Image (cartoon, helix red, strand yellow):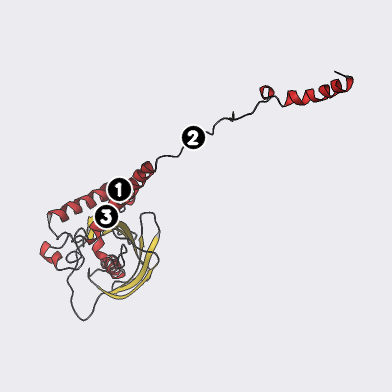
């Protein structure tokens, strides 16, 4: 072998080594860490949760609708009596102003129409047609004769609604008229009288199924033995003003009216 052939052999040697299959490494698989699981819950679990939530809402809404559309209990029925007992229980234990007034010796508590017979009460609007657990279910009066004040606690049932859930303004006016007249008649020596004027301003809704207080005040400076100027406010249990009214009550001259007792 001459020197030229030996030089060519040395130049080709690196190429031969690089192209040798035994020296070439090919990476066929990945060594990267696999991604963690996504953590998605089964769609069936979500469906069961949604079904439970909306099913519960449906039961609550259905029971509410049933109460709204159900036939009202008849006055004097066992259902009506049970409802009245529950309303009375809440009045005794759950109305803070009742406990406060009972501790005040200046106020005397009484039920309305105690001076009337059962037959007579059936012929009066508020103690007859409007009575019962779904009507004017309860009226209790706290009188302060020295200051010419009265506070009445009244429960309004759902049968007195005008708009749904709201007590009819006429029903409120009726109870206002009686409370103001009660304050005036206790002031008159004749113990009788009539409504001559009545003004009412409705400030906020009065909702059925709740207790409200009527704060009545006779104006002793303007009133006489035959004229009584009276104001009244309806407030909810939080003290919010819902209705305010003013009126004039008089003792008639041309005809004789029955004399009212102290508890009416």
Q: Is residue 1 above or below residue 119?
A: above
Could you tell me if residue 136 is visible in this image?
yes
Q: How far apart in space, not on screen, are marks 1 and 2 (Cα)?
A: 56 Å
Residue extending furthest bottom? Answer: 254
Q: Which residue is mark 2?
A: 37
Residue extending furthest top? Answer: 1
Does residue 235 appear left or right of residue 34 in this picture? left
Q: Mark 1 or mark 2: which is in front?
A: 2
Residue 124, percent from left and from top: 17, 68
Give the secondary structure at mark 3. helix
Of the numbered discs 2 and 3, the one sitting upstream in the chain is 2
Q: Are marks 1 and 2 in contact (CB under 8 Å)?
A: no
Q: How far apart in space, not on screen, are marks 2 and 3 (Cα)?
A: 42 Å
Q: Which residue is mark 3?
A: 62
**Quarter where residue 16 is shown:** top right
Graded by Cα atoms within 10 Å as few (under 14), some (14 to 19) or many (20 or more), the crowding at tag 1 reads: few
Residue at horizontal 57%, vertical 30%?
A: 33
Graded by Cα atoms within 10 Å as few (under 14), some (14 to 19) or many (20 or more), the crowding at tag 2 reads: few
Could you tell me if residue 139 is visible in this image?
no
Residue 58, percent from left and from top: 30, 52
Of the numbered discs 1 and 3, the one sitting upstream in the chain is 3
Residue 94, disc: 1
């Amino acid at each position: 072998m001459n020197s030229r052939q030996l030089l060519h052999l040395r130049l080709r040697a690196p190429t031969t080594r690089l192209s040798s299959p035994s020296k070439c490494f090919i990476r066929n698989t990945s060594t990267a860490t696999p991604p963690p699981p996504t953590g998605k819950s089964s769609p069936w679990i979500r469906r069961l949760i949604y079904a439970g939530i909306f099913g519960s809402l449906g039961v609550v809404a259905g029971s509410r609708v049933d109460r709204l559309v159900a036939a009202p209990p008849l006055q004097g029925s066992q259902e009506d009596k049970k409802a009245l007992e529950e309303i009375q229980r809440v009045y005794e234990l759950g109305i803070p102003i009742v406990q406060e007034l009972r501790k005040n010796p200046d106020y005397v508590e009484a039920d309305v129409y105690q001076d009337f017979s059962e037959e007579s009460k059936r012929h009066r609007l508020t103690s007859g047609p409007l009575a019962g657990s779904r009507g004017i279910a309860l009226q209790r009066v706290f009188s302060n004769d020295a200051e010419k004040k009265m506070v009445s606690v009244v429960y309004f049932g759902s049968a007195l609604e005008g708009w749904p859930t709201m007590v009819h303004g006429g029903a409120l006016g009726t109870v206002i008229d009686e409370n103001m007249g009660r304050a005036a008649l206790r002031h008159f020596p004749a113990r009788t009288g009539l409504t001559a004027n009545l003004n009412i301003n409705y400030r906020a809704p009065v909702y059925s199924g709740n207790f409200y207080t009527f704060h009545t005040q006779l104006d002793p400076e303007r009133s006489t033995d035959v004229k009584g100027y009276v104001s009244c406010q309806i407030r909810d249990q939080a003290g919010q003003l819902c209705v305010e009214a003013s009126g004039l009550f008089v003792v008639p001259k041309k005809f004789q009216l029955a004399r009212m007792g102290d508890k009416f």
